[in-house]
Amino acid sequence: MVSHKTQSHQKILTRLAEQDAQHIHRQFPSMRAILEKDSDGGMQKIAISVFDHWLRDASEWHLMNITDSMERNRRNQSMEAHWASLFDLTPIYTPRWRGRWPGKAKLTLKRYTSRDGFLAQSRFSPSKAPTQFIILPEQGCIYAAGWDDTNVLYFQNRDNAQPVIQLAVAAGLCVLHFDET
C-alpha cells in the first residue's frame, strides 16, 4: 500500500501582469538605483530603527551585534509586528532577478500573496544579511531592510508615507532623520 502525503504549498509570491509592473516602474523610476544602493533616486528618506538615535560613537557599536538575548527577541518582535502591519495595510511588491546572471538577468516584480511567507522572509537571521526590499505603491514608498536593525523608508510624499511611519511607531520602532547624522 502506498501512502501519499498531501502538502499544501501556498505561493508566497505571484508574478505581476506586465501593465501593472510597468506602472510601478513608472512610479518608481529610480527603483533599480535604490535596490543596487547607487542612489536614493531623489526620493526623501528616513530610517526606521530599533534605536532611538544614530549610533555615532564606537562605544555604541556593540549594540548592533545583539544575537542571543531578550533584547534580540524584543527587536525581532518589533520588526515582525511592523512587517505584519504593512502586509495588512497594503499590497506589497518586491523585485526579483530572472534569467542568467549577469548578462541576461532581468528585473521583474512580484507581489506577496502569503502573509506567513512574507513574514518568514522578513525575519532576522544571524546567519544572513537582511535582503527585504519592498515596494508599497499605494503609499509611494520603497522600504529596504538594513543589517543593523535599521531600515530605510524612501518616499515621494511624506503625507502618503505617514501610515507606514505610524505603524512603525506603533510597533515600538523609532524614526530617525538622515539630516541628524
Image: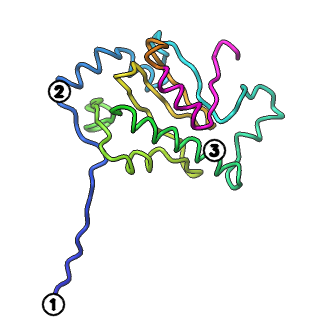
Is disc 3 surrounded by few (<14), some (14 to 19) or many (20+) residues within 10 Å?
A: some
Q: Residue at x 25, y 32 (%)?
A: 104
Q: Residue at x 21, y 25 (%)?
A: 20
In the rendered view, does 33 fall on the left or right side of 81? left
Is disc 2 surrounded by few (<14), some (14 to 19) or many (20+) residues within 10 Å?
A: few
Assign a secondary structure to mark 3: helix
Sequence order check, earlier mark of 1 and 3: 1
Looking at the rendered structure, the kind of residue marked 2 is Glu
Q: Mark 2 near mark 1, Cβ–Cβ under 8 Å?
A: no
Which residue carries the number 3 mark?
75
Assign a secondary structure to mark 1: loop
Which residue carries the number 2 mark?
18
Q: Residue at x 52, y 43 (%)?
A: 81
Q: Residue at x 38, y 28 (%)?
A: 135
Q: Quadrant of residue 177?
A: top right
Looking at the rendered structure, the kind of residue marked 3 is Arg
C-alpha separation, residue under disc 2 versus residue under disc 1: 47 Å
Sequence order check, earlier mark of 2 and 1: 1
Residue 26 in percent (x, y) is at 28, 14
Mark closer to the observer (1, 3)? 3
Q: Quadrant of residue 21?
A: top left
Which residue carries the number 1 mark?
1
Q: Quadrant of the N terminus?
A: bottom left
Dominant SS in magenta: helix
* Magenta stretch in the rendered image: 162-181
Mark closer to the observer (2, 3)? 3
